[in-house]
Amino acid sequence: MARLHSQLQYFIKVKVSTDPLWQRKGLTIILSGHDVPGEGEHKIMDFIRHIRSQPNYDPDTRHCLYGLDADLMMLGLSTHELRFSLLRCLI
């Protein structure tokens, strides 16, 4: 996992420095790796709850969550966000 985390960090650095789509103003990239305790889906939901509690939160913010766990549907619905997408690929 440490190797994957370092590769993801490298990928993000390259994309932010070379890809104009990744350099857009207002784009936030957050990498929460293996060194941060907790399940990925729950870390994401904690983050969404945190930004919703901020006074300058824009209710038109779009969220997209990818994963195959069934609890993702329940977590996504529990946010009560209007613009929340859940991606599941069953291949």
Image (spheres, rainbow, N blue to C red):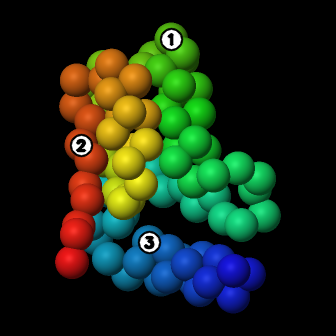
Q: Give the number of the mark in front: 1 or 2.
A: 2
Residue reaching furthest front?
70
Q: Give the number of the mark in front: 3 or 2.
A: 2
Query: Does the image show residue 17?
Result: no
CA gap between label 1 and label 2 equals 23 Å
The N terminus, quarter of image: bottom right
| Amino acid beneath label 1 | Pro
Residue reaching furthest top?
55
| Amino acid beneath label 2 | Ser
Which disc is residue 83 wearing?
Answer: none
Q: Is residue 22 found left or right of 2 in the rendered image?
A: left
Name the residue carrying label 3.
16
**Vertical relation: 39 (above or below) 61:** below
CA gap between label 1 and label 3 equals 28 Å
**Vertical relation: 40 (above or below) 18:** above
Q: Position of residue 36 (x, y in %)?
A: 75, 56
Q: Is residue 23 found left or right of 31 in the rendered image?
A: left
**Vertical relation: 63 (above or below) 58:** below
Q: Nearer the viewer, residue 54 or 42?
A: 42
Residue in the image at 71% along x and 66% along y: 34
Which disc is residue 85 wearing?
Answer: 2
Q: Is residue 34 found left or right of 44 in the rendered image?
A: right
Q: Secondary structure at mark 2?
A: strand
| Amino acid beneath label 3 | Val
Name the residue carrying label 1.
55
Q: Position of residue 49 (x, y in %)?
A: 53, 25
Q: Position of residue 37 (x, y in %)?
A: 77, 53
Q: Position of residue 10 (x, y in %)?
A: 57, 83
